[in-house]
Image: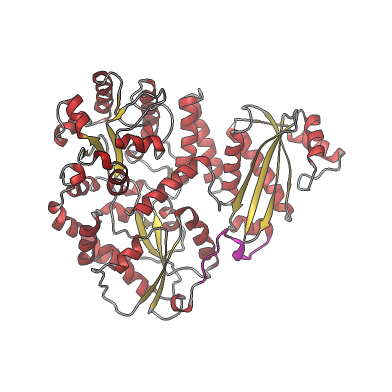
Amino acid sequence: MKKIACFCILVLFITALVFSQTGYTIDKALNNSLFYLNGKIPPKSRVAVLSFTSDWPKLSDYVIEELIGYIVNDNALTVVDRANLDKISAEMHFQLSGEVSDETMLSIGKKLGAQILISGAVTEVGNTYRLRIKAISVETSQILGMQNVDVIMDKRIIALTGNNDTSKSSAIKPPAINPAGANTNSSSKLTLWTFTDELGKMIKASYYKPSYKGVQINTSVTPTDQFQTKLDPVLFSGKGAPDVIALEDAFVRKYVESGFLLDLTDIYEANRDKLMAYPVEVGSYNGRVYGLSWQATPGAMFYRRSLAKKYLGTDDPKTVQTYFANMNKFLETAQLLKDKSKDTCFVVPNFDDLYYPFLYNRKSPWVVDRKLVIDPAIEQYMDFCKTMIDNHYCEGEGWAWTDKWFAGMRGEFKRWDGKPTDIFAYFLPTWGLHYVLKTNAQKTSGDWAMIPGPMTYRWGGTWLAAWKDTPNPEAAKELIRYLTTDDNFLEGWAKATGDLVSNINVVNKISGSFKEPFLKNQNHYIEFAQMAQNVNGKLTTGYDGDMKSYFGEELSAFLWNGKSKSQALADFRAKVEYNLLRGK
């Protein structure tokens, strides 16, 4: 997977934590705004949700009611009695959906006994809607926090506003397609929308020799954090949608389950004997295949050879693997590293490195029959994180993808007290070797090796799909077939990039020929190929991105804010059921 793709995954992960990303559904925008305000408002404050202005009374009422519901279910703040608010509103001739001055709101807040007032507006700005929300202290009149979030048009917004103009559904309009690349009834032209430059490079590669001739492909690249905002409205409206779509792991299931994609089952059936199982599982829904991938992205444990020799007495991968054969061994070795290094060597930079290994060792996906399933592996991960922090086996604060996290790859890590500390290992997938480690750890090149580690897992990937109403279905399917299954093309791609392809024939043919200098000539390809065989793609759902966000909030509360594990899981369940599964 190319550097731009893994960087965009990083951007998605970070923005999911800080909620600075634009282009949300109205429900997600409200939830994100509440998360923002929770960081600005003292816990357990008594709050009143007052005026939300808009040109659409139904939308104003919806925003107020939903925001109150989010606050009640979040359990971090206390909402004033709705009956009292209605009574005072009537006395003062004040409409909850109307425009009210700050002075009037402060007066109402004092009558209610509220400490904090929350208000805002929903407006049209250019080609998008914007939710503005702010919190004011009743005592000091100080604005504690204010946030603007762009909101896309979806079915809910259309229902609340009566506005069916889908040109307003995105903060970023789909680019105008010039006549040479426009969707027509001619099978000689295709449009391809992607979030990564990989597809363009594939098509321009010298070994790209598709079986059809004369098909012009117009490729449009949009950053990952804007891609869904651009794609959703054209799929909803059926106007201007691309023929072929690249889908990133974070949102592939959303579209696979959407009903907007062309059935690719015939491509799979013709090539099933040579395709790895899990990428097909991720792209399948209700027994049909809607997305195919040319790659597999299993994860490994990458460790520093010099530190292994120093503290374990060997850097041999087979021997080192015995120290990390399961999670009990992993924790035992973490203690060993701590003792032998006199507390100057962490086994990993932080607990977040192990999220995906635990995630893909569940027995059940997050949602089954529209009900949340909290697999025992999730509770085990929470206990694992607590153990890691309490015993100082890793950094006790912060997350992956920070400057400090990267510094450990170069041997320049300093922990919370400023003490220089070595990082023994990182957990990364196939693309992490080429576009994370090798680009950020040049100083330690040749000092690394890889092992399976305690658990099989995967992370990331790109799938190709086609719009169900493309006027060029045969050309679209042929492009997807060629890029995801063709032996000759994928052999050329694998040799040129080191990408682990999902074509078993190609993997078996070339896997013995790889030597990676960064890993002291270890054959990473054959190692990854073996790991990919055990990955379960059926654990992936369209809810996974949101689940990671909501779970991360409660995990933080459990680790650092004194919340019990049982309460954190209960609050996680309440958020998910209210925000994601309600009405499903």
Viewer-nearest residue: 583 or 319: 319
What residue is drawn where x is 13% and y is 53%? Answer: 513
Q: Quadrant of residue 403?
A: top left
- The one of 33 and 579 positioned closer to us in this rendering: 33
Q: Is residue 352 left or right of residue 98?
A: left
Q: Is residue 375 visible?
A: no
Q: Is 167 colored magenta in this rendering?
A: yes
Horizontal side of 162 relative to 439 (left or right) equals: right
Residue 555 sits above or below residue 176 on the image: above
On the image, the x and y values in percent for residue 78 come to 66, 30
Is residue 510 placed above or below 203 in the rendered structure? above
Residue 384 in sight from this viewpoint: yes
Is 100 left, or right, of 122 in this rendering?
right
Q: Residue at x 63, y 26 (%)?
A: 44
Q: Give coordinates of residue 545: x percent, y percent.
A: 45, 46
- Residues in magenta, as a range: 162-176
Residue 227: give x, y in percent of width and height: 47, 57
Q: Main secondary structure of the magenta part?
A: loop
Q: Residue at x 64, y 55 (%)?
A: 129
Give x and y (percent) for residue 207: 23, 68
Give whichever of 498, 129 is nearer the camera: 498
Q: Viewed as shown, does residue 252 lie left or right of 36?
A: left
Q: Is residue 75 above or below residue 57?
A: above
